[in-house]
Amino acid sequence: MADTSARILRLLSLLEARVEWPGGELAERLVVSARTVRRDIDTLRELGYPVEAVPGPGGGYRLGATGKLPPLVLDDDQAIAIALALQTAPATVTGIDDAVARALTTLRQVMPARLRAASEAFEVTALRNYWEFSAPPIDVATLQAVGSTIRTSSCLRFDYADPDGRVPAPGDANFRPPHDVEPHHLVVWAGRWYLVARDRNHATWGTYRVDRIRPKTPAGRPFTPAPLDPDDLNRLVVQNPDRGDTPGQWQCVGTATLALSADVVARWAPGGSVVAPIDRHSCRLTIGGWSWAGVAGLFITFDTDLTNVEPSELRDAFTSIRRRLELASPARLRPRRQE
């Protein structure tokens, strides 16, 4: 009986994890026959769970949208995933630390002993890696406002703050009217949150730093989302030099012109760097580090010609690196004497 109960809970967990399952795949996952799966499905229905049959070759099942579901059905992997997600969430979102701690405690209290042990096996302490160029944590209210407009396919109006966090007022030289966009995706990359949206006035796609968004209410009118695949998101965020990034707060910040296109440099430059296009084959890269030699090393990784290097401390660092490499290289071989 214990094996049957565990199998039915596992079946329920699988049905919750995916919209639809072929009957044969469920049987394979549970290591039982198709007949046993049908019998377990009938048991779930008797318990009040709305399991629907899916017609078609081989048949299948899905969990309906109504009915009383258990408060928590997790397997070991899901318990570990939730525990890790809750413990790492405060690193990029602010204002939810207390809620995260309470949620983790509540989850562990209702878990069976075996699952609680699995989740407690991963106690995470987050320490900063100084080569991570992450942005300040996002305010949870801003994240909820932006996420809600994406979920409901509603237009979003917002002020866009300057890199220092200030929103220019009317009359300021750099004042900009509120953006009016169709929000499509939230993307997290290199420790930063980005909104991918389509500008309603110019019909162009844009990428905005969520930590600089100041939503305005009420929510806008509904729109029909355009399909975007992972390649589109990669182009609009990872390969996009105009994604609102600012130089990391380092004691050494340098800049140089690279003989590479801006999209290539933007793809491989770490967070906390700024890429400014010059033409199709060159761009200006600004990047920081804890030492001038470290900044020079980051530029060298692009393996291309560098010009207009600034400031002088960065030029001196390149000279020092060249001298050290010459000292470290083996002596040149003397040419053989002709006999």
Image (cartoon, rainbow, N blue to C red):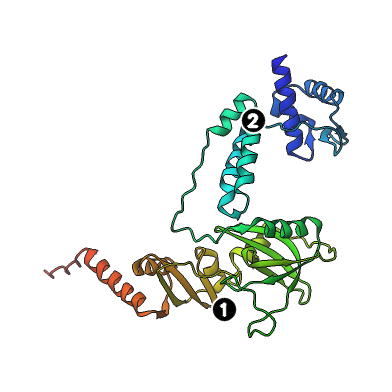
Instruction: Find residue 109 and name its label.
Output: 2
Tag 2: amino acid: Gln
User: Quarter holding the C terminus?
Assistant: bottom left
Looking at the image, residue 169 sits to the left or right of residue 87; the answer is right
Res. 82 in view: no
Density class for disc 1 (Cα within 10 Å; few <14, some 14-19, many ≥20) is few
* Residue at screen point 55% across, 33% down: 120
Q: Of tags 2 and 1, which is closer to the observer?
A: 2
* Residue at screen point 58% across, 54% down: 92
User: Quarter holding the N terminus?
Assistant: top right
Q: Residue furthest top?
A: 1
Q: Position of residue 28 (x, y in %)?
A: 71, 28
Judge by depth and name the residue closer to the eye, 195 or 14. 195
Q: Position of residue 229 (x, y in %)?
A: 70, 58
**What SS does tag 2 mark?**
helix
Quadrant in the rendering for residue 164: bottom right
* Total numbered labels: 2
What residue is pinned by disc 1?
A: 280
Looking at the image, residue 128 sits to the left or right of residue 192; the answer is left
Instruction: Find residue 3 and name its label.
Output: none
* Residue at screen point 44% across, 76% down: 255
Tag 1: amino acid: Arg
As drawn, 49 above or below 203: above
Quadrant in the rendering for residue 112: top right
Judge by depth and name the residue closer to the eye, 133 or 170. 170
